[in-house]
Amino acid sequence: MATLHVLVVDDEPGIRSGINRILSNYSVGYPFMEEDFDFTLIDAGTGEEAIEILNNQKVDVVLLDNKLPGMDGIEVLEYINKEQMDVAVMMITSFASLDLAIKATRNGAYNFMPKPFTPQELRASIENVAKHLFLKRMTRKMQEEGKQIRFQFLSVLSHELKSPLNAVEGYLKMIQEKQFGDKVEDYDKMIERSLARLKGMRNLIMDLLDLTKIESGKKQRKIREIDLAEIAKLAIDTMEPYSIQRAVKVKMTTKGDTTLLADPDEMEIVFNNLVSNAVKYNRDGGKVDVVITDEKSSLLIKVSDTGIGMSKEDLETIFQDFVRIKSSKTRDITGSGLGLSIMKKMVDQYNGTIEVESEPDKGTTFTISLPRN
């Protein structure tokens, strides 16, 4: 059995001893892990003491209270980020400090847990942290060690797909057995949830395939002269059923020659991400403007929406792998967190640039410049 070293940073001895009791005989296991994890607990009552431990001992997970005497939790988190330590941080906070906890997650904390918490809540949170840490380290090994780790990554993927498959299977059995009535409309919610789960699985698989092709350098590129206006229109048509459902008006404008030497599949990925995000993260009755401008030596693509927007903190992370903006407004929006990351890699292949301007509750504008040479 492997052991995760957990550093508990809290100035309340009762909290530290309580966490010790809850986790002392607890272990975590997943089908894709070769062995289960158990936990070794380390205590710190101040931020300064925590940093000393981090510098001198092996630590995998930090349960970090923000309100500490002297150096507070956010400062400890900033130190961990600055030193690029390979640890997963979970903030522990009172309900009154939830805004601060959310800010901490944007600054690198994996998650937060409000006080008071039950033993079940702590164990569930530790399970998620352990899985996150395992996946993060395995992805790094994947880049270094090759095929064996890639096989293990497929095991993880199968595990992540198993949960939605089980849900869909459960809904279908309920419908088959007519557990809630004989009318089709009695099962509308189950059908809707099943379709959402299937869509999420499909998106995850497609995004992972795209990412794997890019990272491996084995994607065969078919560079030829294409019309970006046609690619953009195809992306708009693909999103039309959803945009109609939400009464979002999508308008495209072209200025000058919109042809470019490029791989049509790559440009389709770029526009699919731009347009789908602009529609998905919009408000009902909103609008999306897609503008492609000929600037002689380059083509300028600008996609603007009137949606929920993003904060400055969110803008700093949106192009990272597996990053999704988490808020009450995005809770019901499905996605793998890979779309923008893949799009950025595509644009980089063309020596292009991406700029993002956004304001919460007002909208977002993505501007991409693709050189013609």
Image: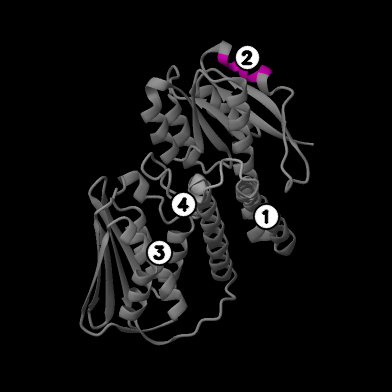
Residue extending furthest toward the bottom:
225
Q: Nearer the viewer, mark 2 or mark 4?
A: 4
Q: Mark number for residue 334?
A: 4
Instruction: Between residue 185 and residue 108, name the one nearer to us.
Output: 185
Q: Mark 3 — residue?
A: 273
Residues 34 and 237: in front is 237
Looking at marks 1 and 2 on the same chain, the residue that comes earlier in the sequence is marked by 2
Q: Cα distance, mark 3 to mark 1?
A: 25 Å
Answer with mark 1 or mark 4, whichever residue precedes in sequence: 1
Q: Secondary structure at mark 3?
A: helix
Residue at the limit of the structure toward the front, as seen here: 182
Determine the residue positioned at 28% across, 51% down. 284
Which is more N-terminal, label 4 or label 3?
3
The quadrant in which residue 155 appears is bottom right
Question: Label 2, on which residue?
Answer: 17
Identify the mark at residue 158; answer none if there is no mark. 1
Give amino acid for label 1: Ser
Mark nearer the N terminus (3 vs 1)? 1
Q: Earlier in the sequence, mark 2 or mark 4?
A: 2
For the record, the magenta segment spans: 15-21
Please indicate, yes or no, whether residue 304 appears anywhere in the rendered image: yes
Q: Residue at x 33, y 82 (%)?
A: 372
Q: CA distance from mark 1 to mark 2?
A: 37 Å
Residues packed near mark 4 inside 10 Å, few (<14), some (14 to 19) or many (20 plus) = some
Q: CA distance from mark 3 to mark 4?
A: 13 Å
Q: Secondary structure at mark 4?
A: loop
Q: CA distance from mark 2 to mark 3?
A: 48 Å
